[in-house]
Amino acid sequence: MDCDVLIVGGGLVGSSLACALDAIGLQTWLIEAAPTRRIERSWDERHFVLTRTSIEALDRLGVWPLARREAEAVRAVHVTGVGDFGSVRLAASEYGLEAFGATLPARVLGEALAARVAARTYIRVEAGRLIGLEIGGDAVRATIDADGTTRTLMTRLVVGADGTDSAVRRIHGIDVERIDYGQTAIVSVLATGRRHAGIAHERMTAHGPFALLPLADDRAGVVWAMPTAEAERHLALDDAAFLAAAQQLFGYRLGRFARIGRRQPWPLVRQMATRLVAPRAVLVGNAAQTIHPVGAQGFNLGLRDAVALATRLAASGGDPGAVDLLADYAAARTADRERTIAWTETLLRGFARTGAIGRLARSVALLGLDAQAALKRDLAFVLMGHREGLDATALPNLKVA
């Protein structure tokens, strides 16, 4: 047997899982098709929003201490709707916390994970592309293509962490349920005229959400979703015209927008695998589900996949590809996936209602939610990433003081 676990896909979720499995002592191969490249720091680089639970998990894996230097705390969330008189305000301090989570440059998180992977004992990293799987009774023969050279290796479990177009999912014939929202998110960074104070703003429109996320140095990350035709028009605007459009939609609560970075388009789809497991195989991250970015839940959901799988493998101590173990994992992930999807879909449908009656109903709903402590607490727990039966403290503690 070459390894206990073969992880196909060395991105953020796959690398996080590899770190956790290394701590358990499982021999792990990490296969990544694209070679790792260094991403240079830039004023307008891509950022992630990490929930409190994700930060706890990364801390247990010894990753967060390497990354937190460039993190910006999310201390509050303010949800409003264009044309609505209601709003929802959530402050971490109301729950005795410093923050709900943090924003972090994707570059920094990637570098921290790469450093941890490189320092591990039981991880072997290989460049290559999965082209075939042959399932046996107690093992899998995986065929890997590395620059035209084919090799095979034997493993007891294959993990598909290889993204939306997962080869593991395709080889196992797992179907997907796909919804094309007909939208594109424009992602960028802008400079604000006033301090953001750690507040994340979600401004909902009938055509999609507009989010401003607190970044270091009083910058704000922009995620603006709109119909694809409109996105193409906005991408063609010069910087001044784009800032003016964003300012008109958001208003001046953060002062005058002064600078916009590179604008990157991201087509928006929801894609859900109809099954999470197959014989000696399991899907995690975007291979399992790709969701709308409203609420910034995508990576956090994928990391919870990795935490759930790693904790079950640690508790089992036996065959990592055992049928019962994988079935338990799949059953345990159902509620979290469904709840996260339902939450994002409710936001999108609710704010898509137009007309005076729709706006009135939405405003009343926002006012009612803001006045209900129990409902606000439930929403705060969603924002923090807490899920029943999922505990990051069950991970092996690799934290470095």
Image (tube, grey):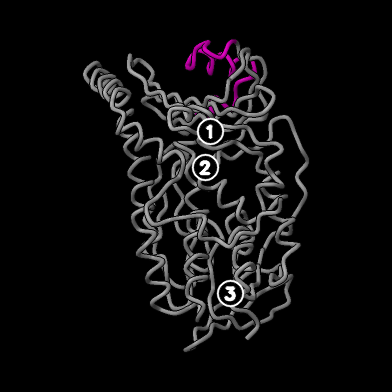
Q: Secondary structure at mark 1?
A: loop
Q: Earlier in the sequence, mark 1 or mark 2?
A: 2
Residue 219 lies in the magenta-colored region: no
According to the picture, the residue beneath numbered tag 1 turns out to be: 99
Q: Which mark is residue 5?
A: 3
- Tell me whether circle 1 and circle 2 mark residues in contact (CB < 8 Å): yes
For residue 44, which quarter of the picture?
Answer: top right
Name the residue nearer the viewer: 112 or 133. 112
**250 in magenta:** yes
What's drawn in magenta, residue-wise?
Answer: 231-255
Hey, what amino acid is under mark 3? Val
* Residue 108 appears in view: yes
The amino acid type found where label 2 is placed reads Arg
Q: Pinpoint residue 43: horizontal percent, then vertical percent.
A: 73, 29
Q: Residue 9 is drawn in which quadrant?
A: bottom right
Magenta stretch, overall SS: helix
The residue that appears at 41% across and 66% down in the rendered structure is 329
Residue 262: image x %, image y %? 67, 30
Q: Amino acid at mark 1?
A: Ala
Q: Position of residue 60 (x, y in %)?
A: 60, 54
Q: Residues within 10 Å of mark 1 (few under 14, many from 20)?
A: many
Residue 72 shown left or right of residue 318 in the figure: right
Q: Quadrant of the N terminus?
A: bottom right
The answer to whether 132 appears left or right of 387 in the picture is right
Give me the disc on residue 52.
2
Residue 78 bears which disc, if any?
none
Question: Which residue sits at x=73%, y=59%?
Answer: 35
